[in-house]
Image (spheres, grey):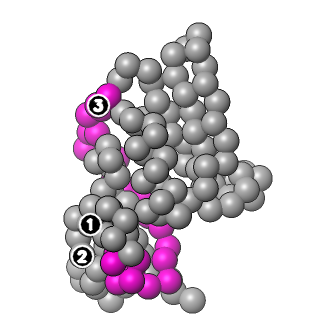
Amino acid sequence: MRILHTMLRVGNLEKSVQFYTEILGMKELRRKEYPEGKFTLAFLGYGDESKNTVLELTHNWGEENYILGDGFGHIAIEVDDVYQACETMKKHGGKIIRDAGPMNAGTTIIAFLEDPDGYQIELIGSTH
């Protein structure tokens, strides 16, 4: 068994795809429209779906905003250098909501940014 994907509902698919590809460096792997259901799915990730967990962005036509709720936490992405990643992401329009630095009560370097829908993305420094 393995985790295949995580699904997020997004209000503006193109804006979200742009964020995840241009700011976080993912690739759009596939996209399919479902006219009868009035939704579009876009799958993004850092590698082929057969070997990597990916992100499914679901755009329900006509929906522009979602209530994020308090049960969802964040998506975590490993980067080589959190400080450099934050600078690069800021230059590309990324919204950093917690600057790079040691985590509370620990030494791991982390940062947080927000996607266009308000979902939080944690950047964690590489341990290898």
Mark 1 nearby-residue class (10 Å; few <14, some 14–19, many ≥20)? some
x, y percent for residue 112: 30, 67
Q: Is residue 23 above or below residue 19?
A: below
Q: Quadrant of residue 83?
A: bottom left
The residue that appears at 32% across and 62% down in the rendered structure is: 94
Which residue occupies 53% across, 64% down?
Answer: 25
Q: Is 50 placed left or right of 115 in the picture? A: right
Residue 93 placement: quadrant: bottom left
> Where is mark 2, residue-wise?
99
Name the quarter where the C terminus is drawn: bottom right
| Residue 106 is at least partly visible in this image | no
Q: Which residue is mark 1?
A: 96
| Dot 1 and dot 2 residues touching (CB under 8 Å) | yes
Amino acid type indicated by mark 1: Ile
From the viewer's side, name the closer residue of 106 and 60.
60
* The magenta stretch spans residue 72: yes
Horizontal arrangement in the rendering, residue 2 relative to residue 11 (left or right): right
- Labelled disc at residue 65: 3
